[in-house]
Image: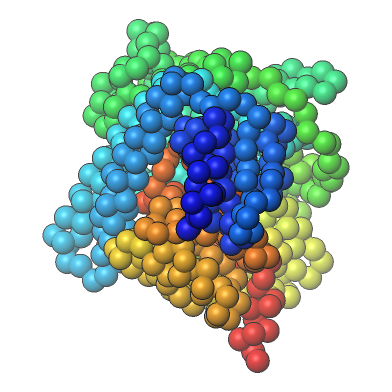
Amino acid sequence: MRLSPVAKALLVAMDRPAVLVGADGASCPNAAFEALPAAVRARALSRKPPAGWTLQMIEGGLTLVSSAASHAAPETIKAFARERALATLSHEIRTPLNGVLGMAGLLSRTKLDPTQAAYVEALSESGEHLLGLVNDVLDYAKLGSGKIVLEQSPTDVERLLQGVAELLSPRAHAAGIDIAWAAAPGLPSILADDGRLKQILFNLAGNAVKMTAAGGVLVSAEIANRRPGRIRLRFAVRDTGPGLGAEAQAGIFEEFEQTAEGARAGGAGLGLAIVQRLAGAFGGKVGVDSKLGEGAVFWFEAGFKLAEATEQPLALKGLTVAIASGCEIVREAARRQLEASGGRGLVFVTAAEAARHAPRDALLLVDPPSGAAPSPPPEGRQALVLLTPEARDKIDAWRAAGYAGYLIKPLRRASLEARVLAATAPGAAAAPNARGQAGGFDERAEAGFAHGARVLLAEDNPVNAMLAQALLSREGCLVTRATNGEEAVKALAAGPGYDLILMDVRMPGMDGITATRVLRVQGVTTPILALTADAFEDDRRACLDAGMDDFLTKPLDSAALRAALGRWTLGRREAVRARLAS
């Protein structure tokens, strides 16, 4: 951004935070503005700056955005310097790690002999271990550098639980265990910092997955107390791992404290300390209930204001469904989701047992053992099969074996409702759709489900760009690459319409946040997803405040990318199909 001598002099002379913004959205700040936290800077540059900020038009079509407050104190500048240093460390470490892990993932999907496959698996495991250490150390350093500021926004608790379970499901399934979620019936939306709340649950559930060798992990939320306008929730993560003795429980939330099992599993011993720090910011408390050999329940409890209430119909009222699974976590989660939808859930270990004892009109949900060959459901029974996303290539074989449809684990309550209703409707068995499935679309079961979607990828790192292009192409996307923000802006102005933009945050020249502001000023409404190696919540919030719609954290994960494509391209599916047909 080029400034006239007058504009430069004005900016330097100001004794308070100020920034000049051009008509194209490009900005030039003074030192006091740079010293502000990232989230504050982003809000000041939003379309409607918050109270205490003024807008003034000056020469050359520039807008001067300035604060009524005095310039930043030395302590603020020092805090800003620490924040920037940590963000730079995060970016510089995670960016090459993204390339290592991403390329290892792509290599694992090629034809390898057993020895090569073992080497690639070891490479991936070592990289994931290093990534976990980096995340914990940097996040703990960031939390220790200043006060934690929580932002309130309407939060759908069920969606939060589902998101955590789905993010961790590839790791859990790779370890041969299940992960599931459940929520109390009628659980309302709350006002909370959903990013920090998700971080608490992700750390607790990630720790549980790491410690569990067989069985599974259940992420849940219950109502502890309720009064007008407020609610106290108890979030719990239960695992079927080795459990903890009294001595281990006493210091488990302290820095660098680990059990013997935790040390063997790897980690810095900071994940639970981070949870305790965040719980304190919420005014809540954390704890663990466990006995050796009996698994553990880690919990977090806090009070929240209620968001605006919405009607929650009981779609499965009056229906009985039998769940057959060898995993108690799957059984409990399915039963509780059915009950939250008004239905009745009966639990059994095997399909044969369910067929013997469940009412004749009860639908069966059958969770086959991992790797089991497709086989018919119990004779005379309508049944749905439960599969992991990794087993989606077996869907047609299970359908051919006699199942009315499928559900993907971890279960989604919306899909559960839709498919139970479809399977129990009159004539359901005789009239399946082309895929043998009705209702409750679930992108996790689809191969290349974003076929034909046009994606603009703005990424300067060639290895990361190669990885992103490979993952997007696998989903059927048509990808155009830009190497910086300026190229992305030009591509949007000159090229055909795009269905989605993936924008790297840190690029040479015009960065991703500036490019996003420019595009929004120009009236571009295409969803923009940040690609960021900054693992901190403040940085993610700054992306959203700049006009981005969502973010993906590096190393780029295929499951997270698929979920994001589901969120942001499914609404444009009909337009894409019409374009392909023309």
Residue at image location 58% in from the left, 57% down from the top: 22
- Quadrant housing residue 509: bottom left
Residue at image location 32% in from the left, 58% down from the top: 102
Tell me if residue 241 comes above or below residue 453 in the rendering.
above
Count of numbered circles in the view: 0
Q: Nearer the viewer, residue 566 or 415?
A: 566
- Quadrant housing residue 87: top left
User: Do we see residue 198 in this rendering?
Assistant: no
| Residue found at the very far left of the displayed protein | 115
Residue 443, given in percent of the width and then of the height, sits at 57, 63
Residue 424, given in percent of the width and then of the height, sits at 76, 60
| Colour style of the rendered protein structure | rainbow
Tell me if residue 424 comes above or below residue 340 in the rendering.
below
Tell me if residue 104 comes above or below residue 180 in the rendering.
below
Q: Quadrant of the C terminus?
A: bottom right
Residue 451, given in percent of the width and then of the height, sits at 54, 76
User: Do we see residue 528 in this rendering?
Assistant: yes
Residue at image location 85% in from the left, 20% down from the top: 228
Relative placement, left or right, of 213 versus 230 is left
| Residue found at the very far front of the displayed protein | 6
Q: Nearer the viewer, residue 432 or 255?
A: 255
Residue 548, given in percent of the width and then of the height, sits at 58, 53
Residue at image location 63% in from the left, 23% down from the top: 234
Q: Nearer the viewer, residue 390 or 90?
A: 90
Tell me if residue 296 comes above or below residue 475 in the rendering.
above
Q: Nearer the viewer, residue 224 or 553?
A: 553
Relative placement, left or right, of 133 versus 445 is left
